[in-house]
Image: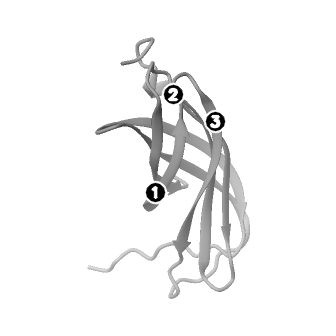
């Protein structure tokens, strides 16, 4: 199905990572992804899933449906956003830079066949109005 070994593993590049929070407790993760279809067949990007880590701690996961045609050997860039909800009981931390790691996959469909193309990125982002998740007490 692919032109070279590991072509699907290298088909997505994270160009930008945006992460913002509001004083009211809402947040948004925005990813700008560059994707290519390294196969001989026309396909369609049908979704993106993610895992977000802040300073190494898992913070959020999610999925977003996407409808983006991607012809054989085509390169395209698109932006996808994921809403985040903060813990309302936790205290807002002072503004500082956090190590933001995001990984996941872009689903590329060829009719009934779907292939997941992984991505991973790490950035340091200065976050305002961030309230960390409070661990459950046992």
Per the image, label 3 sits on a secondary structure element best described as: strand
Q: Could you tell me which residue is drawn at 36 percent across and 18 percent down? A: 1
For numbered disc 2, what is the local secondary structure? Answer: loop
Residue at 55% across, 54% down: 55
Residue 37 image label: 2
Residue 51's disc is none
Please provide percent x and percent y for residue 85: 52, 76
Q: Nearer the viewer, residue 42 or 65?
A: 42
Mark 2 is surrounded, within 10 Å at the Cα level, by few (under 14), some (14 to 19) or many (20 or more) other residues, namely many
Q: First in sequence: mark 2 or mark 1?
A: 2
Give above or below for 73 relative to 4.
Answer: below
Task: Residue 76: give its label.
Answer: 3
Pick the quarter of the image with the C terminus: bottom left
**Mark 3 or mark 1, earlier in chain:** 1
Q: Which residue is mark 1?
A: 65
Residue 36, compared with residue 66, is above or below; it is above
Q: Earlier in the sequence, mark 2 or mark 3?
A: 2
Which residue is painted at 53% across and 70% down in the image? 84
């Amino acid at each position: 199905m692919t032109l070279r070994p590991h072509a699907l593993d290298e088909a997505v590049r994270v160009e930008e990572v945006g992460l913002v929070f509001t004083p009211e407790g809402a947040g948004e993760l925005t990813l700008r992804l560059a994707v290519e279809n390294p196969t001989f067949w026309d396909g369609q990007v049908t979704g993106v899933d993610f895992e977000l880590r802040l300073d190494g701690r898992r913070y959020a996961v999610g999925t977003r449906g996407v409808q983006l045609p991607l012809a054989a050997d085509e390169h395209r860039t698109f932006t996808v956003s994921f809403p985040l909800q903060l813990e309302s009981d936790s205290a807002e931390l002072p503004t500082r830079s956090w190590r933001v790691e995001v990984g996941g996959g872009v689903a590329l469909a060829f009719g009934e066949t779907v292939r997941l193309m992984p991505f991973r990125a790490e950035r340091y982002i200065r976050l305002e109005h961030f309230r960390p998740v409070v661990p459950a007490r046992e």
